[in-house]
Each structure stands twice: as structure tokens, then as C-alpha cells.
Image (tube, rainbow, N blue to C red):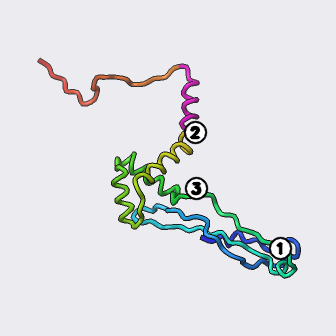
Amino acid sequence: MSADDDAPFGCPYCNTPYEVLGEEAVRRELQYVPASVKVLEYVSVTYICPQCKEDDVPYIVKANVPKGLMKHSLASPSSVAWVMYQKYANGSPLYRQEKDWSQYGIELSRTTLANWIIYCSEKYFKPMYEYFHKQLLKRQFLMADETTVQVLNEVLILK
């Protein structure tokens, strides 16, 4: 992905349109799309004013790049959501998911997958948990079903 849409129009001092000075790959991340995996590459474009460059006072501007989910990681929101969904909704252990990613051509260890889950649960889910916990504690009373006897699917035997 390129940051050409963020290109400034021209030099604020002399109104000369910018020329591209260089590009810098900022980060890569995996985006999970069911049955396929794409590697998205974000590129930061650096612009220079050609007129100011000749006047020995170069004016250089670097385009903004969207912030990643985790620093220095291939993790994207969709890939982490898929790992969590597979683990907690489908009961697929990380060693199996490691093999699945390998079949897509991506070598991710189960340790990396576990770190994604831990980091995202602490950073994104913990604040929600704490909010709902505070709301729960504000109530006058709480109700729970703590029945130790099986209630459903009981067969009544009459003698």
C-alpha cells in the first residue's frame, strides 16, 4: 500500500509541486481472509520540493502511515481475531493453527500466536472487562445458577 493519497500538494514557501525523494517500507502485517492469506505492505513516501532543493534549503515531507495493531509484528486485527476465534470458539489448539498457517505458506510459531492472544486480550479486552466488572459491582444483588444437580434431560423413574 502506498501513501500517495496523503501526498501534500506543494511547498508552503514557494508553491512548487513536490517530487518523490524516496520511499521507506514501514511495516508488514498479515490480513486473514478465510481460505487465503494476503501480506499487506505499507510504504511511507518521502517528498521533496524541487525548487527549494535548488535553493540549498530542501523542504522534505514524509507521508503519514496508519498505526499497526502490535509494533514490529505481522499481526493484523483480522489475523488475531481468527486465531482467537479458532482457539476459543472452535477449540483448535495453537499447535494445529501453527500447521494451518504453515499450509498457507506463513511460518508462525505457536509461541507467536499465544503472544498475539495475550497482548491483544490485555490491551483491548481488559479495559472492557474492567468496565463491565465495575457496572456489575454497582448492582444491589447478583443472581447466578449454582445448581449442582443436573436439571435438564432427567428421566423420571416411577415405581
Considering the numbered disc 1 on the image, is that residue within a helix, a strand or a loop?
Answer: loop
Measured along the vertical axis of the image, is residue 124 above or below residue 30? above
Q: Which residue lies furthest to the front in this view?
A: 56
Image location of residue 117, percent across then percent down: 47, 48
Task: Compute the Cα span from label 3 to label 1.
Answer: 32 Å
Image location of residue 139, percent across then percent down: 56, 23
What's under tag 3, amino acid-wise?
Answer: Lys
Q: Earlier in the sequence, mark 2 or mark 1?
A: 1
Measured along the vertical axis of the image, is residue 76 above or below residue 2? above
Q: In this view, does 86 lie to the left or right of 30?
A: left
Q: In this view, does 68 lie to the left or right of 117?
A: right
| Camera-side residue of 84 and 96 | 96
Residue 71 numbered mark, or none: 3
Residue 67 numbered mark, or none: none
Q: How crowded is mark 2: few (under 14 residues within 10 Å), some or many (20 or more)?
A: few
Bounds of the magenta segment: 128-140
**Magenta stretch containing residue 40, yes or no?**
no
Considering the numbered disc 2 on the image, is that residue within a helix, a strand or a loop?
Answer: helix
Residue 11 numbered mark, or none: 1
Q: Which residue is located at x 40 percent, y 67 percent?
A: 105
| Camera-side residue of 128 and 95 | 95
Q: Which of marks 3 and 1 is nearer the N terminus?
A: 1
Q: What secondary structure characterizes most of the magenta part?
A: helix
Q: Which of marks 3 and 2 is nearer the N terminus?
A: 3
